[in-house]
């Protein structure tokens, strides 16, 4: 992978940073965050401004360009990738390492006195604006909103914003109608005494209306906003998508509906002016509820005294707790996904020794097998198909320049998933198609012990996910190893593969307590730069746990794996497992054999079934 | 224990809340925090205003009195105690439980529109003021500083503020001279470009000047403030304590010193006016560094633009990392403390069956044995000597009304410690002098497993203590049990038994990463209301760990127990321990036997030595 040459682009950007055509006053620094106007993690090509200016196309990162410097902040998953993709104009700021300055501290250290720092107010979340603006002001600088996005001014071949048809989801998938979701939302609004709720996150709009789209690759969402009043619903969406009879029927646009469920459809671009009108019409004590991660532009549309900001919206919290229909859908999706992976791994086992399978071929084959399954829509993220040293690049995606051939001498790591109409999957397996070394097995087994420690953990109701993170690391820590990423993230139900408000991470963020029905990933790893990567990931459902006692009647929770794909026993050093861990593996494999075996049988996939049976032979532990 | 009758006092307080003599405008609510003007946890009798008005004398709690209501917020350690000590005028607000409102939310729910909420600006920390003031303002109320403390106006027999002689500590105890500490502090100030540092916490003043006092029971501190400039030192302290020749010599008050080390001694009460003068003399870009927990009054003395506030001061962080002299002192103190406890437990074993030992007698006996040890100064906190149901009151202190007799039928929990001139101790042991039930042993063993999990944990350099908290709970969680307090706190070196900035707790607070030389407690527990309490506590030192690998050269840490007192093996269900846990207990007991055995021998305490030998017999685990 050769880095993007950015000398000319940076020169152009620095020119527009001073051009009266675009900025009222010259800005000495310009911030290019990762997100779009909805603070999405995955973004449409037209929103990949940070990748355009720097070359670095990982899912998380913030670029800052000053007159002299260009710097990129990203986290441990992307240190290697960013270093490979960026040229010498860029300084990589490794977040999470002790000596890495924050963006604010760095700006203060490099800027001339009284500088202006520009940013697109639609892209920067309000909470970040607040923090950064305060830090800059206290050092004598100013954060200023630049209305026109400066990257767009130099991005001559910027693609169009997508506007693809919508999918309607009926009750058998969602369990709850959009009307009932609106009723529940309004009741949360009444509890907090707010009159208006602004839906800014794309997955929240999609979830609320039981609609899906394909405007953003991997995320079944569509560009839209909504403003929910106590008896009005405004949906801001472009294109002729509202002309589709199925959508009109679904939203009952042509029915004689009670007025409080009548949806008013408005152009996507009119959100700011509509919201400003709402803001201007407020009386004292009337409040508007927004996420504190909504854009600065939309947040500013509401006078400060009228804003009610929370880290997580009631939609975000409701969406995280899956109902019975959603859980059943997720189970079905994971069974189909496991069938596809059994086919893949059986195929790889035969083909890899021939030396003809590259990372890209393996990824394509995985997609091919998935696409044969019912209700397959698309992948849920770019397949991480990586062998040998590429496995240590945590969010690696094979491209022709880096594409390695799988061999019987290297570890292969596949992190992949799909969107099915009934659910979203995300699974990582690490395999060896030859004979792993003792050291590789040792590391794999520590990662497995961490995976089991989380998966089998029992914890009280009300526990936050971050309290479970160390369980995943303990076995690695014992011998001086670790991994530089969180252990798990929330997973949507035919929605974004990463969603809040829960997760399992050493980073202390405002995660909501885990509750039965939430779905998260469990994915510890170990990475040796230049050598190999190991990760074992299941998607797990939070379920009530039966315990011997019940302290203060709080009740306990645990996890049930939804992912049912064998964990390669060849990679396990059984002597490092406790009896309990060994039993966990065996009963997990027994379940894979039963559930996935039956489906492989039903689908007539006998060769893959043979592979499954072989791979789920019980481990034997020396007594 | 009968509750304090507060009807009349509350009536008087509500009168002064409206009296123009004390308040510019009537206040509809008055907040009585726990602390003193230094935000101390342990306070002098004259500062026990919250206990005076409510009867509840636990170490943590905030009272709020409105015209109609009186409410007390406290945490899980004190739910039972507060409920016992307060009369029906008071509502107990159980912090940490899901349905308990915050103080702000509660105030907003009960106050009439446009209320004023008063508080003593010297008692409320600036960060709390800020949070509460903001919340109240957004609901249309005002937080107002009431200069005269309203409790003091109705507290007719309020004791005098103590002003006891000082102790000077030489280099053999402190390892670093106060001059070198000032130099180090000034270098931290230069790094952050601040001109002044205000020392407001009592233990920080004591640590900085290598002085100790006895103004506050259990904490060897004295009432004082200091302001350190780049070349001035002002110490605010009352009484004739500065007339003591030893103190004058120690501080070199009469020496021809370089001007930047010359200490200017000023009256304690002049801190506010002196600080205001500093504030008034500042030029732009000149900053004053304070803890964000310093009082609102002192923080307000510095104009906002000139303040530099941090959660932890450089003194707090430096103080937490013990140097070799301090560590050696802590070791010596813990050996002496263990000798005293071996004597006590040997004595209890003989006396308890006679039915003549009460909780108070046991506590007194513990103090007697400790006071026989060299350099004993005082206890480090009120001894928690509790048997049977009293053990479930987490911070119980026996008083005549509650005093139970120890018996062979109940669990006995002793949490106690002392101040020695060379170190501070804090140890909890849970004993049974008869035959514990299978259930008691089961619970004890889960707590022990948690204790070992933390004590034996290996974790990377830079890990924060809160990431270790779940290790202490995992065995309890597995069977549906838990405890409602943190797992550990920092411990001072002949200073406060609770100190920041590190700790081990599920509560996410801004704890600093653990580093070698820090000292914390490891004290999981289990409490069954009305029945018994179990806690196993050692003070442990953070030390480098040897590991098989060394990921990214970060290095690893672990703990070394400084407390060396046998853990009652009679209470252990050996079958619930893993081999590793069993080995941990045996090697811990081996060390107790060697180190404490040698000291008992040296002190000629042969009977206690016999007890120690018996109590440290290795556990045998069925294979």
Image (cartoon, coloured by chain):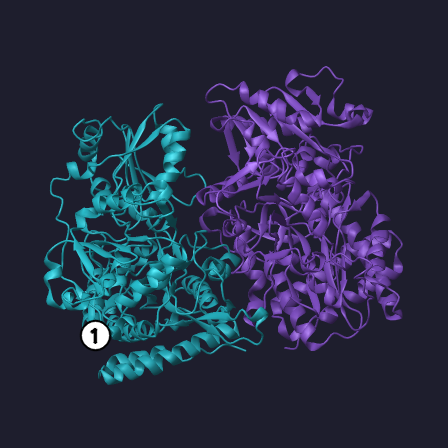
Chain colours: A cyan, B purple
Quarter holding the C terminus of chain B is bottom right
Residue A182 is situated, as x and y percent measured from the top left of the image, at: 29, 63
Residue count near mark 1 (Cα–Cα under 10 Å), binned few <14, some 14–19, many ≥20: some
The reply, left or right, for residue B102 in relation to residue A250 is: right
Q: Chain of mark 1?
A: A
The reply, left or right, for residue B493 in relation to residue B294 is: right
Looking at the picture, tell me which residue is in the foreground, A326 or A97: A326
Looking at the picture, tell me which residue is in the foreground, B268 or B546: B268
Residue at mark 1: A373
The residue located at (46%, 75%) in the rendering is A584
Residue B338 is situated, as x and y percent measured from the top left of the image, at: 78, 54
Looking at the picture, tell me which residue is in the foreground, A158 or B224: B224
Q: Is residue A56 visible?
A: no
Picture quadrant where residue A170 is located? bottom left
Q: Is residue A133 visible?
A: yes
Residue A350 is situated, as x and y percent measured from the top left of the image, at: 24, 73
Residue A87 is situated, as x and y percent measured from the top left of the image, at: 25, 38
Residue A615 lies, with reference to residue B397, above or below; the image says below
The residue located at (26%, 50%) in the rendering is A38
The reply, left or right, for residue A168 in relation to residue B526 is: left
The residue located at (44%, 48%) in the rendering is B552
Residue B138 lies, with reference to residue B472, above or below; the image says above
Quarter holding the N terminus of chain B is bottom right
The reply, left or right, for residue A465 in relation to residue A32 is: right
Picture quadrant where residue B482 is located? bottom right
């Amino acid at each position: 992978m050769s880095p993007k040459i950015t000398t000319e682009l940076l020169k152009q950007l620095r020119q527009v940073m001073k051009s009266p055509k675009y900025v009222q006053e010259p800005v000495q620094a310009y911030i290019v965050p990762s997100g779009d106007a909805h603070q999405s993690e995955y973004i449409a090509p037209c929103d990949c401004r940070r990748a355009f200016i720097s070359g670095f196309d990982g899912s998380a990162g913030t670029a800052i360009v000053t007159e002299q410097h260009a710097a990129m902040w990203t986290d441990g998953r992307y240190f290697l990738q960013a270093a490979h993709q960026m040229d010498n104009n860029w300084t990589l700021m490794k977040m999470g390492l002790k000596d890495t300055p924050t963006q604010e501290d760095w700006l203060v250290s490099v800027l001339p006195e009284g500088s202006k720092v520009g940013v697109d107010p639609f892209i920067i979340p309000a909470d970040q604006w607040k923090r950064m603006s305060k830090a800059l002001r206290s050092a004598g600088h100013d954060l200023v909103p630049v209305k026109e996005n400066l990257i767009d001014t130099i991005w001559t071949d910027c693609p169009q914003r997508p506007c693809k048809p919508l999918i309607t989801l009926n009750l058998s998938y969602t369990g709850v109608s959009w009307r009932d979701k609106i009723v529940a939302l309004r009741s949360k609004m009444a509890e907090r005494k707010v009159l208006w709720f602004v839906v800014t996150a794309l997955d929240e709009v999609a979830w609320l209306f039981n609609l899906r789209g394909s405007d953003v690759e991997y995320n079944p969402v569509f560009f839209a906003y909504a403003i929910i009043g106590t008896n009005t619903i405004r949906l801001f969406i472009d294109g002729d998508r509202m002309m589709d009879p199925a959508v009109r029927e679904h939203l009952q646009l042509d029915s004689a509906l009670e007025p409080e469920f009548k949806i008013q459809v408005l152009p996507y671009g009119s959100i700011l002016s509509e919201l400003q009108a709402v803001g201007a019409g407020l009386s004292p004590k009337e409040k508007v509820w927004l996420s504190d991660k909504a854009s600065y532009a939309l947040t500013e549309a509401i006078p400060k005294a009228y804003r009610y900001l929370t880290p997580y919206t009631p939609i975000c919290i409701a969406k995280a707790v899956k109902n019975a229909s959603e859980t059943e859908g997720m189970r079905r999706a994971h069974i189909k996904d496991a069938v596809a992976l059994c086919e893949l791994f059986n195929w790889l086992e035969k083909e890899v020794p021939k030396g003809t399978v590259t990372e890209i071929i393996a990824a394509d084959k995985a997609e091919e097998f998935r696409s044969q399954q019912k209700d397959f829509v698309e992948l849920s993220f770019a397949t991480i198909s990586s062998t040998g040293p590429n496995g240590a690049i945590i969010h690696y995606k094979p491209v022709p320049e880096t594409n390695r051939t799988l061999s019987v001498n290297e570890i292969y790591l596949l992190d992949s998933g799909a969107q099915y109409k009934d659910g979203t999957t995300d699974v990582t397996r690490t395999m060896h198609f030859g004979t792993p070394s003792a050291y590789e097995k040792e590391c794999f087994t520590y990662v497995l012990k961490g995976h089991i420690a989380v998966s089998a953990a029992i914890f009280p109701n009300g526990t936050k996910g971050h309290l479970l993170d160390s369980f995943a690391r303990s076995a690695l820590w014992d011998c001086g190893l670790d991994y530089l990423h969180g252990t798990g993230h929330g997973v949507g139900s035919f929605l974004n593969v990463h969603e809040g408000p829960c997760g399992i991470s050493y980073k202390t963020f405002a995660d909501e307590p885990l509750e039965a029905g939430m779905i998260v990933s469990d994915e510890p790893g170990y990475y040796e730069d230049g050598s190999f990567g190991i990760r074992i990931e299941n998607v797990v459902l939070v379920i009530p746990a039966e315990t011997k006692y019940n302290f203060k009647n709080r009740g306990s929770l645990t996890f049930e794996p939804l992912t049912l794909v064998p964990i390669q026993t060849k990679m396990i050093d059984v002597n490092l497992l406790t009896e309990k861990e060994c039993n966990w593996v065996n009963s997990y494999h027994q379940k894979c054999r039963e559930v996935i075996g039956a489906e492989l049988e039903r689908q007539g996939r006998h060769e893959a079934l043979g592979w499954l049976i072989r791979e789920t032979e019980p481990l034997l532990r020396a007594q």
